[in-house]
Image: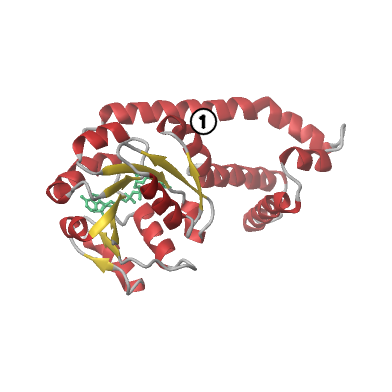
Amino acid sequence: MAIGFIGTGRMGSMLVRALLGADHPLDEEVWACNRSPEKLDDLSLHHQKLVTGESMELARKCRTLFLCVRPGDTAAALNEIQAELTAAHLLVVITNVVELDRLAARVPCRVAKVIPSFAQFVRRGVSLMIPGPRCTAEDLAYLHGLLERVSRTYQVSEAQSRAATNVASCGPAFLARFCEEWAAAAHRMQPDIPMEDWEWLVWETVRAAAELPRAGIAGREILEEVSTPGGMTYEGLAAMDAVLPAMWEEVMRRTAEREREMKAAIRL
Ligand SMILES: NC(=O)c1ccc[n+]([C@@H]2O[C@H](COP(=O)([O-])OP(=O)(O)OC[C@H]3O[C@@H](n4cnc5c(N)ncnc54)[C@H](OP(=O)(O)O)[C@@H]3O)[C@@H](O)[C@H]2O)c1
């Protein structure tokens, strides 16, 4: 059966592109729709195999539907497809703001959540899978098979999802921000080296460090290898120790608070 993506903004189009370009192509047709035509036109221009239509048509043709709209657009998108949804559908949302129990009370089908990551643009990173009401073992196996084409998968409960999202999905942005600040500090210290060169140095170092676990050298061991007690790296790490735990606490606290606010505000 076909698979459909409702909403081809950043996440929807990224997932469609990743799946259509995956090494193991899908057997089923991939359908997509978007509220405004431009993004969809652009996507189908580059992917001849993509089938496009209105959301109601997607609901008629596809048994798995990914709802890739912003939380505030969820109710309207559901209204459009409501009449076509049956128990045979698997409806997948991609935001923590839409709670699966509330969604399941609104639709007759099986529901699940997948939290993607922009890292799937390069078919890497982790997709979080969260089963919801009526979701079967077959549904999970299907989602696993689908998402493993473009990422690794990791299953969590909805209660665990905020913390996991802060790593797997917010991660590329958090890391980019960290690296930007790092390059900027180096540039302030040594402005005669251009900023582009600092950015290149930082990202090349991150890429290399990310490969070290593959060689059997992971987190704590990297610290031991690089940081000689009393040396300069040791001193730099002491400066980080003074701020990093509090910073990550605050990141976790504020994302959770924002999610609670958005959940309270959303109408399905
Ligand atoms: N960005 C990330 O890294 C990330 C990661 C994980 C999860 N998410 C979640 O993914 C969701 C989408 O985020 P995004 O960044 O992709 O947002 P986005 O770029 O704004 O894309 C949303 C798309 O949905 C379309 N849309 C809205 N209502 C629709 C409807 N009724 N039928 C068809 N299409 C409709 C919009 O069309 P228009 O062109 O008319 O606006 C837009 O193209 C959010 O809930 C976000 O929390 C995002």
In the rendered view of the protein, which quadrant contains the N terminus?
Answer: bottom left
- Closer to the camera, 268 or 243? 268
Q: Is residue 258 above or below residue 123?
A: above
> Left or right: where does residue 201 sit relative to residue 95?
right
Residue 249 makes an appearance in the image: yes
Where is residue 237, by image quadrant?
top right
What residue is rendered at 39% in x and 45% in y? 137
Q: Is residue 230 above or below residue 57?
A: above
Residue 248 coordinates in the image, percent (x, y): 57, 30
| Outermost residue, left side | 83
Query: Which kind of residue does numbered mark 1 sit on?
Result: Val
Q: Around disc 1, counting alpha carbons within 10 Å, would you say few (fewer than 14), some (14 to 19), or many (20 or more)? A: some
Q: Which residue is mark 1?
A: 251
At 28% from the left edge and 52% from the top edge, which residue is drawn?
A: 65
Q: Is mark 1 within 8 Å of ligand 1?
A: no
Residue closest to the eye, 174 or 111 = 111
Quadrant in which residue 31 is drawn? bottom left
Q: Residue furthest front?
A: 137
Task: Report helix, strand or loop for mark 1.
Answer: helix
> Does 218 sit above or below residue 229?
below
Residue visible at 69% across and 25% down in the picture: 242
Image spot of residue 149 (x, y percent): 48, 60
User: Which residue appears farthest toward the bottom when viewing the image?
Assistant: 48
Q: Position of residue 201 (x, y in %)?
A: 69, 55
Is 200 positioned to the left or the right of 129 in the image? Answer: right
Quadrant of the drawing holding the C terminus: top left
What scheme was used to colour the molecule?
secondary structure
Q: Is residue 225 left or right of residue 212?
A: right
- Left or right of 191? Residue 50 is left
Q: Nearer the viewer, residue 51 or 90?
A: 90
Relative image position of residue 81 (x, y in whole percent): 17, 50
Please say whether residue 6 is visible from this viewpoint.
Answer: no
